[in-house]
Image: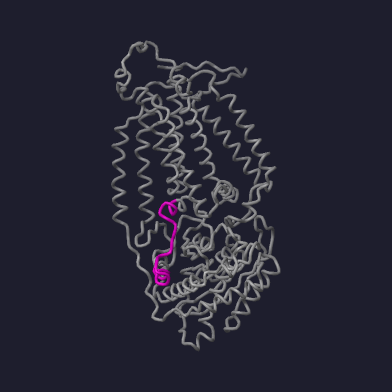
Amino acid sequence: MPASDSRARGRRRPPGAARPPDGAQPAQRRRRARKGSLDRPINAALVRAAGLLVIAPVLLLMLTIVRPGPYPASALPPSFDGVSATGLATELVRDFPARQPGTPGATGAADWVKEKLALYGLRTTVDGWDQEIPGLGRVHLDNLVTVIPGATEDAILVLAHRDNIGVGPGANDNASGTAALIELARGYGKLGTVAGRPTPMHTLVFLSSDGGAYGGYGAERFAATSPLRGRLRAVLSLDGLGGTAAPRLELAGYVPRSPTPALLRTADVRVAEQQGRLPSRPGWLAQLVDLGVPFGYGEQAPFLARGISAIRLSTASDRGSGAAADTTARLNVKRFAQLGRAADSILSSLDGGVELVGGTTAHVYLGSKLIRGWAIELVLLVALVPFFAGTIDLFARCRRRRLPLAGAWRALRIRFAVWLWVGLLLGLGALMGVFPRGSDIPPAPDSPAVRSWPVAWLLVLGALAALGWWRARRTLVPPAPATDDEVLGGYLVALLTLGGVAVATTVISPYGLVFVLPSLYAWLWLPQVDRGSGWVRDTLYGIGLAGPALALVVIGTQLGLGLDAPLYVLSLMTLGFIPWQTVLVLIVWAAVATQLGALAAGRYRAVPHLRRSGRPQKVQTNY
């Protein structure tokens, strides 16, 4: 017999309730229950009426959609030489195939870049520092900075990391970006002046960064400490321009902010001019997830975190799959030349902008259209109203019935303690070095900090987590089916706590409601279908889990993580990119999810009050 059927048959009826006759007709059993009864505790009409309030902010969102325009194209054609850039990339890979930070190959590659820039009369400043990189240890890194003075103090930054992870030669990722950086800077050197290149309107900064293959340590260093950072109005990161994959733009940062619409549209148009179609970019759903979980992998992220508009142009996989095969023979020379010219055109358009708009705003970019972030926040906030209307009405009905709730609160508290125990074990694992910690940026998807997890310690922590669950299970497993009032009380307590999760999420980041709303509106109807078909309960419960699952799927898809996505998200927690406040809210949500799961499966028990002797105290049930 299914658990749900046994629960329904085993529940205690209110005194005086007549048992249905044995020969009851199906039509009698399907008679619609009275509003406010145990069969229909949720006021559906009230929820639907409150849902009409969402129409106004949705209409406002549609009215505020704008079409951003690009910066004007330069009158001069791109001077980027694809043949010369390909030769530079080939030379770098041949002379220094292993450029892992802290190695002699990395030092040689830095000297090579300085020598190439010096050929064009370009002076390079070296910024060196020691950096702790999870999975790699403490290594020395060097940023190489070349500044071209302009007519104004406002600056435009072009950067490309020159290091790799040491598995392969890194011809595309990122010898191609380094070669493109040198080729772009060449036009502003002495040879470029002879060719008639005018003095730039803005100060141009070319940065050959270190530690980019591990997430962007060089970019983080420049954004945090460079004297030029306060003058930056736009940043263009070149990261693998000669791959076989379609060109794409990356726009995510460490905070829920996006690059300026004009920068995005300019990059779109200039790339399309060279290759005949727009570059790919994260879809609207992925951008919403990035705003809700702003971990922002890549060298554009540190600048966006500090309010500096930045984008990354790339064809390389963030996962780094096939790094051993990343040789010059695999370079797409035609695409490399196209994207090099596109980068040249983007830089010229930005420099030609008389009033270059800097800063960052939150929005969802759809190419020719843009949705304002504040309009999305307003829709998400108003979307909470129907849930709270239904939950508060249910609370009022239960108060009138004098429904006992203490046992339900105790059951939820025990489940919260179990999940808090799991969270504390994760923190202990970070302190012991099982999980990564102590990094200023998210780890690279293929870094040792993500790929090389100590299995033995994971098994120990898993056993301790299982021990905590087993200890709690002894109290939570029901010896007998719960009564109808106990079940409804369990639902009410869970829904009230879920409302608290929604409020806390709003305070931390309104965009995080994207992950909570499926839970609110799927689980709100669980009390309404508690006596209905089991597949309906299971479907609603599964829909409620869709929010966190969506985050895992989108992050895993963006970075090519596959089944490693949960482990990567754990590393974001232990590194602090998912702040402790969000982790605590997630723990409360998990406690609610497990309580509602027990209710939906017919395995719920209201935990009675324990006397000092350890025996349960009888709780009076009011009908």
284 magenta-colored: yes
Q: Is the magenta stretch mostly helix, strand or loop?
A: helix
Looking at this view, is 479 or 588 the one in front?
A: 479
The correct choice, above or below, for 452 with respect to 399 in the image is: below
The reply, left or right, for residue 103 in relation to residue 473 is right
The reply, left or right, for residue 33 in relation to residue 332 is left
The correct choice, above or below, for 535 with respect to 321 in the image is: above
Q: Residue furthest front?
A: 329
Part of the protein shown in magenta: 269-288
What colour scheme does the image use? one colour
267 magenta-colored: no
In which quarter of the view is residue 373 placed? bottom left
Q: Residue furthest bottom?
A: 194
Rendering coords of residue 206 (x, y %): 54, 74
Looking at this view, is 115 or 98 the one in front?
A: 98
Identified at 44% across, 25% down, the residue is: 489
The reply, left or right, for residue 88 in relation to residue 2 is right
Rendering coords of residue 587 (x, y %): 53, 39
Looking at this view, is 226 or 180 the one in front?
A: 180
In which quarter of the view is residue 167 placed? bottom right
Identified at 71% across, 69% down, the residue is: 104
